[in-house]
């Protein structure tokens, strides 16, 4: 196996119950990267699939012939932790100078991986580049689509006004891997799906082609959506609570007009913000220490 410093690009592919199409995805990624002149690793993170996904990946690797510039690693999560944790496990196991998150259902063309790489290497200060779909093919229920649109509007326009451009809300993106890890090599608590943990001058997006997903049924239902993104929702609630406290403090100290009920509300929101801060700290520890098993395939 190549050393950590010699690998230039890591492609992280989290997957779950994808036995019907994961082989096509992997073949397409290999084809797109077969002529590159740098070392690449493809890290497939099987997030506790209950079908034959893991066996199929193993057989695919045995039957496939890779260029010497490509190596493949399979990570097996002990349970179905969800896409964020699966992706974090992949990033923690990665060795490349740059790391790309790529969906398992070919929503994006693998050739666009090199487009992201070209964009981020053009500027040494760039930390993250997101892929903006030129046209989006929706295969989700109406309520998920509405929640997504409303969430993007609120997060990108009201709660995080510094970042009005919501194009970074795509899972397809590339990172300069060093920005995700501390000097001690430990993974930092930086959000890998949204953008508020990054300097706006050091992130960008490029237009990429979006196509019909090979997954005919989404893995998300309402409970799954809340479970996957509840840490993001909590940050929004926390921001609302802090804003409410500041507003009431302003009314109390400047306008000198605040009732006992408003003081009680202010205290409640202050307490809520503190509880959320504690829970997010606990959640961070859980997310960064979920067990997985590394299998070097080829």
Image: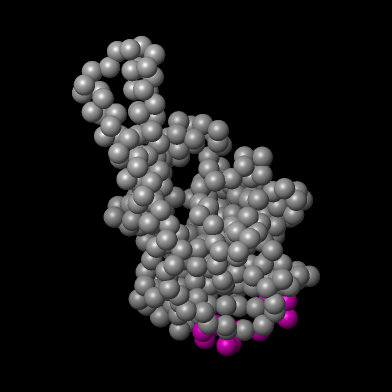
Q: Could you say which quadrant of the image residue 54 lies in?
A: bottom left
Where is residue 103? Give x, y as percent: 52, 62
Where is residue 109? Give x, y as percent: 60, 60
Residue 4 vertical placement versus 228 (above, below) = below
Region rendered in magenta: 58-70
Residue 131 vertical placement versus 106 (above, below) = above
198 lies left or right of 265 = right
Q: Can residue 243 be seen in this view?
A: yes
Foreground of the two, 30 or 156 = 156
Total marks in image:
0
Q: Which residue is drawn at 21% across and 21% down?
A: 260
Where is residue 214? Give x, y as percent: 47, 64
Foreground of the two, 261 or 95 = 261
Task: Give yes or no for residue 235 being in the magenta stretch.
Answer: no
Q: Residue at x 65, y 50 (%)?
A: 127
Foreground of the two, 235 or 208 = 235
């Amino acid at each position: 196996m190549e050393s950590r410093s010699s690998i230039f690009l890591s492609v992280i592919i989290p997957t779950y119950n994808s036995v019907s199409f994961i082989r096509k995805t992997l073949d397409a990624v290999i084809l797109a990267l077969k002529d590159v002149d740098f070392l690449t690793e493809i890290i497939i993170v099987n997030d506790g699939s209950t079908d034959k996904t893991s066996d199929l990946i193993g057989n695919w690797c045995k039957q496939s012939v890779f260029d010497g510039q490509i190596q493949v690693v399979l990570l097996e999560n002990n349970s179905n932790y969800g896409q964020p944790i699966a992706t974090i496990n992949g990033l923690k196991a990665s060795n490349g100078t740059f790391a790309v998150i790529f969906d398992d259902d070919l929503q994006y063309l693998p050739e666009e991986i090199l487009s992201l790489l070209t964009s981020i290497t053009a500027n040494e200060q760039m930390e993250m580049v997101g892929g903006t779909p030129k046209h989006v093919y929706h295969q989700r229920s109406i309520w998920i689509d509405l929640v997504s649109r409303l969430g993007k509007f609120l997060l990108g326009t009201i709660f995080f006004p510094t970042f009005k451009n919501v194009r970074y809300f795509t899972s397809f993106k590339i990172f300069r891997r060093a920005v995700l890890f501390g000097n001690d090599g430990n993974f930092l608590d930086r959000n890998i799906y949204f953008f508020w943990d990054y300097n706006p001058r050091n992130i960008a997006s490029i237009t990429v082609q979006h196509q019909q997903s090979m997954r005919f049924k989404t893995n998300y239902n309402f409970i799954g959506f809340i479970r996957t993104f509840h840490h993001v929702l909590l940050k929004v609630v926390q921001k609302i609570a802090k804003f409410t406290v500041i507003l009431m403090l302003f009314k109390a100290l400047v306008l000198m007009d605040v009732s006992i009920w408003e003081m009680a509300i202010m205290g409640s929101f202050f307490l809520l913000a503190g509880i959320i801060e504690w829970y997010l700290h606990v959640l961070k520890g859980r997310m960064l220490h979920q067990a997985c098993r590394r299998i070097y395939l080829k």
